[in-house]
Image: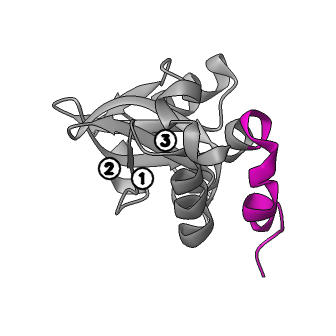
């Protein structure tokens, strides 16, 4: 069944995005306001990176850091792994497993059209849980 479900069928299209020059303070505010754990960084409609809660903690928060002087491109994760909207959810699960990522930006001809998470995949196609179970485990 998984190979008949396409990424575009279950992706979220309400993706919060910021620009390369957006301050880390604004990124954190967007994440808090929308109760989300990741935002995409885009330039000219094309995704260039992703910022997750972990990126903020590891790369932006430090004693005395001024989040207004840190910009998105300084803390985002890159290279960015993406998937085309017509790919199967099985392909998405394999990408997430292989790259050990929880969020997968969805593109159409390189432009951002949505986002899919490992939780989306598990709920939409429970048969994928064995493939995704490694993403629930803490890293060593």
* Residue 129: x %, y % from top left: 80, 54
> Farthest bottom residue?
140
At horizontal 32% and vertical 32% (from top left) the residue drawn is 112
Residue 97 position, x and y percent, is 62, 66
Task: Name the residue tied to disc 1.
Answer: 76
The residue depicted at 50 percent of the width and 17 percent of the height is 14
Q: Is residue 8 above or below residue 13?
A: below
Q: Determine the secondary structure under disc 1.
A: loop
Residue 17 screen position, x and y as percent? 40, 28
> Can you tell which quarter of the image residue 113 is in?
top left
Q: Quadrant of the N terminus?
A: top right
Could you tell me how far apart the alpha carbons at marks 1 and 2 are, in whole angstroms?
A: 5 Å
Q: Which residue is mark 3?
A: 67
**First in sequence: mark 1 vs mark 3:** 3
Residue 68 appears in the figure: no
Residue 77 within the magenta-colored segment of the rendering:
no
């Amino acid at each position: 069944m998984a190979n008949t479900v396409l990424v575009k069928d279950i992706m979220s299209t309400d993706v919060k995005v910021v620009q390369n020059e957006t301050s880390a303070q604004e990124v954190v505010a967007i994440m808090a306001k929308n109760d989300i754990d990741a935002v995409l960084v885009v330039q000219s409609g094309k995704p260039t990176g992703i910022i997750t809660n972990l990126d903020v903690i590891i790369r932006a928060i430090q004693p005395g850091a001024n989040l207004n002087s840190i910009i998105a491109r300084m803390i985002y994760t890159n290279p960015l792994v993406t998937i085309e909207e017509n790919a199967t959810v099985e392909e998405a699960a394999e990408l997430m497993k292989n790259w050990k990522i929880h969020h997968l930006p969805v593109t159409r001809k390189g432009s951002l059209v949505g986002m899919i998470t490992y939780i989306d995949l598990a709920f939409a196609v429970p048969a994928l849980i064995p493939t995704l179970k490694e993403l629930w485990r803490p890293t060593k």
